[in-house]
Image: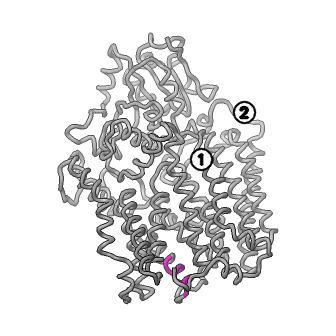
Amino acid sequence: MSSATVTPETAVRALPREPAGALRLARHTELIVLLFAVLVFLPSLFSPPHLMDDEDSARAQISRNMVQSHDWVTPRLDGVRYFEKPPLMYWMVAVSMEVLGDRETSARLPTFLFSLLLCWLVTRMARETLGERAGLFAGLCLSTCCGLWLFTRILIPDVALSFTVSLALWSFFRAVSEDNPRMARRNAMIAWASLAAGLLLKGLIAAVFIAGPICLYLLLSGLWRQCSTWRNLMPIAGTAIVLALASPWYILATLRNPPVLDFAMHSTPGIYRGFFWYHFFNEQILRFMGRRYPHDFSNVPLPLFWLLHLAWLFPWSVFLVRAIRLRYRSDEPAARLRLLALSWIGIVMGFLAFVPTQEYYSMPAYPAFALLIGSGMAEASDRTWRWCVRAVAVVAACACLAIAAALRVSWGIPAPGDIAQSLSRHPAAYTLSLGHMGDLTTASLAYLRVPLAIAGLAALAGILSAFTKRGMRSALALAVMMVLFFQAARVALAAFDPYLGSYALAHALNEAPPGGLIIDDPYYEFSSVFYYGNRNGLILNGRVNNLEYGSYAPDAPRIFIKDADFVSRWRSADRWYVASDDENSAHLRNLVGAEALHAIVNAGGKTIYVNRWPAVAGAVPLNAFPTPFQTSVPITVLHRQQ
């Protein structure tokens, strides 16, 4: 970096308000942040909770399919081509499975490592340019904010994309600020390589989230006028690096999945146009125009999308008010980095304002928010600290009261079986990541007493932080509060495990006699049955969402069946199992009769039935139980293998 960069030593000397012990602590900024990141993210490597239905198990299964088929070019799910995302995340999970074995920990390891790397990188960015204190605060903000923890519970590539975007923008910032041509070229090459990795993680959106902030920053700072800027960025050589790293997979995927070139700007149900059209036009362009087919998700209302960031960045979002008063227009490196962060946020949030949006789509902007929050915290006055920390304490106090009330009303309520039997259902709310919170009832709180108690301790830590001196000690108290809260949330997820996943069903199916599998729902509703059973199956009336397009390929396996196909198979001499949500079981009874459905296992409001009664001994027919079918233990296996 140039000589104008703020070093850790000068930054510490420039901010003498902390006691000597806190200053010594600040010199271990990166270790402290990594410690908190490990405490937050390491427990998520292990089960329970197991991999959930929907994206979680589906993506792990795609990676396993790559390992087993040795086809690392075309992702497949249940034998069907799956072009929704580029393959880099699948590759990393697959390599992890190859090295560490085929287990849940292997599937979750890349997400865990990228979470740590992202927290470390943001700490380093702030530490080098904004000072030690800002580095610590920015790192704590990112590693212990609600959003990063919540959206790394599932195997989506967004945390890896956030890291590549951050690394690209940081390397770009260092390249244009560097006086040494050799160092500038090295940083520029890292930036271009990061862009290539982003293209292999989530497609063209990576180019928007990287090139957009760069262009806006160069425009606002005036650096675009300087010849040295373009010389340091090496746009021609950089483009060659991106093409060399990213294009081979795109070319191979296009050639192996014809038609090769199709430029239609409309989606037509039932028409297969190959990889090129689906990935570039349907998945990238038409998706963000709201014209993608099939339409696989509901859009989060824009005001709610923006407002929720106060929750995703909590408890540190209270310091955003201080970031408004920071200096952004100056030749100082700190002001330049803040301007880059502001450009970063503006492009990501501005772009998402015009396209169909999910809550986690803005994760690549979290590092920029953390940089501004960390800088604001480092420069905040005592009065600002007091008000911000007290605001967190008020929220914590309200949480304490709510937790106490929940424990009081649930005290003495029995908790038989699993939590699914005490939950209500509100599918319309599941568009939001916390939509299942609306399913809670008074009876369900009996299953959550332990996590509620832990969350209460976390809230008490937040209240005590209001009485801690400002600065690092107070920030560490808030970070401890969040670590405790995340452990409570993880224990709560373990209680929800049978409801959000189908591990118990798959385990029972693996112990049952061999037979074919039918899913009475779209694939994603029972994806963990496929993952933990390590098998393919047929899908009854579920030709929807992301598997629909690939199923129209000429050589696609015929995995989708209708009612008549199900009835013929169920009444055949072959053994078949069907997995169904208990609320949908009436449809199966109407098709084949209740006497032909023999339940072998029930968990989480879902049941697996078998058609051939001699295959199980001691099983109980469905009509012997009330509707919906419930059991008195979390996992009830209603068969003994012959």
Residue plotted at (43% across, 45% down)? 95
- Furthest-right residue in this view: 467
Of helix, strand and loop, which mostly describes the magenta segment?
helix
Nearer to the camera, 151 or 422:
151
Residue plotted at (43% across, 58% down)? 299
Left or right? Give the position of 77 relative to 528.
Answer: left
Q: Quadrant of residue 377?
A: bottom right
The residue to which callout 2 is attached is 414
Residue plotted at (56% across, 34% down)? 604
- Which segment did they paint magenta? 332-340
Categorize mark 1 by other alpha carbons within 10 Å: few (<14), some (14-19), many (20+). Answer: many
Tell me whether the residue at label 2 lies in contact with that at label 1, contact meaning CB atoms closer than 8 angstroms. Answer: no
Residue 568 drawn at (x, y percent): 30, 20
| The magenta stretch spans residue 333 | yes
Nearer to the camera, 445 or 450:
450
Q: Amino acid at mark 1?
A: Ser
Q: Mark 2 or mark 1: name the one nearer the start of the chain.
A: 1
- As drawn, 267 above or below 339: above
Q: Amino acid at mark 2?
A: Pro
Residue plotted at (32% across, 21% down)? 569
The residue to which callout 1 is attached is 44
| The magenta stretch spans residue 408 | no
Residue 61 drawn at (x, y percent): 42, 39
